[in-house]
Image: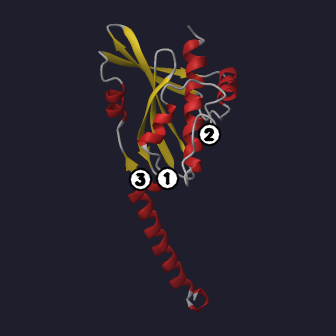
Amino acid sequence: MWASLSKSAAIVLCSVYLGVWCSSQQAQAKVFHSREEALALAFAGADRQDSTTFFLSEEEVQRVATLATAPVDSKLATFYVGYKADQIVGYAFIETHLVRTLPEAFLILLSPSGVVQKLFVLAFYEPEEYLPSDRWLQQFDQKALGPELQIRRDIHGVAGATLTSRAITNGVRKVLALFQVLIQERK
């Protein structure tokens, strides 16, 4: 079929196909919560919330990567802190990364001691069939950083969405390692 088309007709058909494909990809993008909405959900009982931004040294980047057994793609890290009557009620971190070729963002709520309390999906740009369910995300609740916090150990994979499972698990491990290095070890 392509051999019988003129060069300009083939270019037009390819352009139309690319335009339809790109618009279908954008139609699949889903934003569930803004940063403000997610922080309000995470710190529902808090009197106030602050943020603290850290700039990691090379040594801290290496330490986080080693603890997380996952790459650290930025030297900047921002933790949000919820307070009630001047007591810390929790920490939150927004993790953004690529799953296959498109991004996802989720908020990880941690207890003051650094245990996962809840995950909130903020945005997911991959096809919706790769989006993990709330039930799957609940596997991370009450988990701390350790060797068992991995797929096929404490975390069950998502059938047909292996890359999503791996990306979220690595993201949670990275945030827990950031918490350990930037918050716990600096006290």
Mark 1 — residue?
Answer: 130
Q: CA distance from mark 1 to mark 2?
A: 16 Å
Q: CA distance from mark 2 to mark 3?
A: 26 Å
Q: Of the residues shown, which amino acid type is indicated by label 2?
A: Ile
Mark 3 — residue?
Answer: 29
Label whose residue precedes the other's in the sequence (1 or 2): 1
Q: Which of the image's four quarters has the C terminus?
A: top right
Badge 3 density bin: few <14, some 14–19, many ≥20, Cα 10 Å? some
Residue 127 in view (yes/no): no
Q: Of the residues shown, which amino acid type is indicated by label 3?
A: Ala
Q: Say whether residue 112 is left or right of residue 27.
A: right
Q: Are marks 1 and 3 in contact (CB under 8 Å)?
A: no
Residue 136 in the image, given as x and y percentages of width and height = 48, 41
What secondary structure is marked by label 1? helix
Front: mark 2 or 3: 2
Q: How is the image coloured?
A: secondary structure
What secondary structure is marked by label 3? loop
Residue 80 in the image, given as x and y percentages of width and height = 43, 22
Residue 63 in the image, given as x and y percentages of width and height = 68, 23
Residue shown at 47% from the left, 38% from the top: 137
Residue 37 in the image, given as x and y percentages of width and height = 32, 33
Image quarter for residue 62?
Answer: top right
Q: Of the residues shown, which amino acid type is indicated by label 1?
A: Tyr
Mark 2 — residue?
Answer: 151
